[in-house]
Every structure is written in C-alpha cells, then in structure tokens.
Image (spheres, helix red, strand yellow):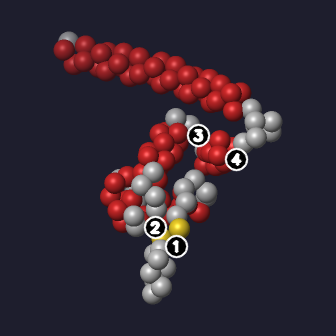
Amino acid sequence: MRIGEVAARSGLSRDTIRFYERNGLINSTKGNERTNSYRTYDAEVVARLEMVREAQNAGFTIAELKMFLRQLEYADGNTFDADAFLQNKIAEVEHKIERAQLFLGTLRATQQALANKVKK
C-alpha cells in the first residue's frame, strides 16, 4: 500500500510515517512503476506503527525503539539482553504510572477543595 493509505489506516501523518522510516522503525520498498518514486508498504506496517506509537507513549525514545526493534529482528541472543532491557523499561513505566496516580490524587483533592470552597 502507498503512504496515503498507511496514513489513513494508522491515523498518522505522512511526515510522521516518513520520519519513522528515516529512523529505521519501518520499511518500504520502491514501487513497480517506472515513472515515479512511490514507495510501497506491507500491510503489517500499520500494526508496527501502532506499536511504535504505544511504545513512545510509554516512554520509549526513538533511539531505544530503533535499537530494540533491530535487536529483536537480528539478535543472536549473545549481544543483547532483551529481558534486562524490557525489565528496565517496565520499571520505568511502572514508576511513571505511580507518579501519574499520585498527581491524579492531587488533582482530585484540589478539585474537591475548590468545589467545597464554592459551596460555602
């Protein structure tokens, strides 16, 4: 499929898709047409883009994603400790969740205090 269809299916802009491709997170191939430079993407790229977006939302950087995906695809098991890497990222995400829950409690308490102040 072409980039327009990938953008429509993924909800990402063409620029974002090109950015991810330039950074090695997704791949495309040159189209069959001789008269243009259209790129084509496999159907699996939409799922990969969703995974990339979720990983970024969870705190992965582009560099970490790039390294992690490359290691998963080409790892020989000796040079990359995927379990340790993932455990580290899990701990980071859990810490962010804890901090977010604490802040959520603060927001709710503030909202309640303001509501009580208005009622008086």
Give coordinates of residue 63: x percent, y percent. 66, 48
Q: Is residue 27 above or below residue 112?
A: below
Q: Residue at x 52, y 35 (%)?
A: 58
Q: Residue at x 68, y 27 (%)?
A: 83
State the CA–CA distance, disc 1 to disc 2: 6 Å
- Could you say whether the residue bearing mark 2 is in a helix, strand or loop? strand
Tag 1 and tag 2, C-beta contact below 8 Å: yes
Front of the two marks 3 and 1:
1
Residue 47 visible to an observer of this rendering: yes
For the residue pair 52 and 27, the one nearer the viewer reads as: 27
Label 2: which residue? 40
Q: What type is the residue that disc 1 sits on?
A: Lys
- Could you say whether the residue bearing mark 3 is in a helix, strand or loop? loop
Residue 53 visible to an observer of this rendering: no
State the CA–CA distance, disc 2 to disc 3: 27 Å
- Could you say whether the residue bearing mark 4 is in a helix, strand or loop? helix
Label 3: which residue? 60
Q: What type is the residue that disc 2 sits on?
A: Thr
State the CA–CA distance, disc 4 to disc 3: 20 Å
Question: Which badge, 3 or 1, is on the more N-terminal residue?
Answer: 1
Label 4: which residue? 74
Q: What type is the residue that disc 3 sits on?
A: Phe
Tag 4 and tag 1, C-beta contact below 8 Å: no
Instruction: Bin the neighbour count of mark 4 within 10 Å (Cα to Cα): few under 14, some 14-19, many 20 and up.
Output: few
- Per the rendering, the mark at residue 30 is 1
Q: Residue furthest front?
A: 32
